[in-house]
Image: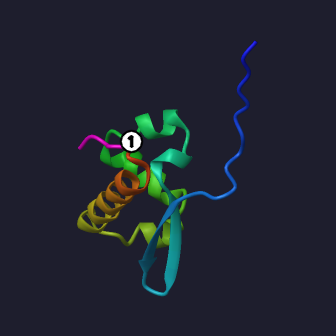
Amino acid sequence: MAEFTLGNKTKVDVLTVKIGEGAYNIPLAGAIPYAKLKALKNDEAIYDFLCEYIPEEVAELLTIDDIKAIFSAWSEATQKAEGISLGE
């Protein structure tokens, strides 16, 4: 009989985002649950995702262009590190 054990990853690939004096680590797509990744279909879902890793008092000062730039960098880092292509 074949067996497979899913192990816990000890090292999680992240994108470090520097905003002002702070630095915030956002896990790449391979380290988040599939349901959460699949839900990133609109601006509100993307903002909520970022707020899980960037304090809301910092995130609420971000412009739409800032959020797009962060998410674009996150998508590119995911694709480079993990080979996961995210739809636009």
How many numbered callouts? Answer: 1
**Residue drawn at x 49%, y 87% as measured from the top left:** 21
Q: Residue 4: x, y in percent?
A: 71, 26
Quadrant of the image containing the C terminus: top left
Q: Residue 83: x, y in percent?
A: 38, 46
How crowded pointer 1 is (Cα within 10 Å; few <14, some 14-19, many 20+) is rated as some
Q: Residue 73: x, y in percent?
A: 32, 63
Instruction: Report the magenta stretch's main SS.
Output: loop
Colouring of the image: rainbow
Task: Write down the quadrant of residue 32 in the picture.
Answer: top right
Question: Would residue 16 be found to the left or right of residue 41 on screen?
Answer: right
**Residue drawn at x 54%, y 56% as measured from the top left:** 52
22 drawn magenta: no
Closest to the observer: 85 or 48? 85
Residue 21 vertical position relative to residue 77 in the rendered view, above or below:
below
Under mark 1, the amino acid is Leu
Residue 52 vertical position relative to residue 32 in the rendered view, above or below:
below
Q: Residue 17: x, y in percent?
A: 44, 72
The part of the chain drawn in magenta is 84-88
**Residue drawn at x 72%, y 40% as measured from the top left:** 7
State the residue lying farthest toward the front: 1
Quadrant of the image containing the N terminus: top right
Task: Write down the quadrant of residue 11 in the picture.
Answer: bottom right
State the residue lying farthest toward the top: 1
**Residue drawn at x 45%, y 40% as measured from the top left:** 37
Q: Which residue is mark 1?
A: 40
Helix, strand or loop at mark 1: loop
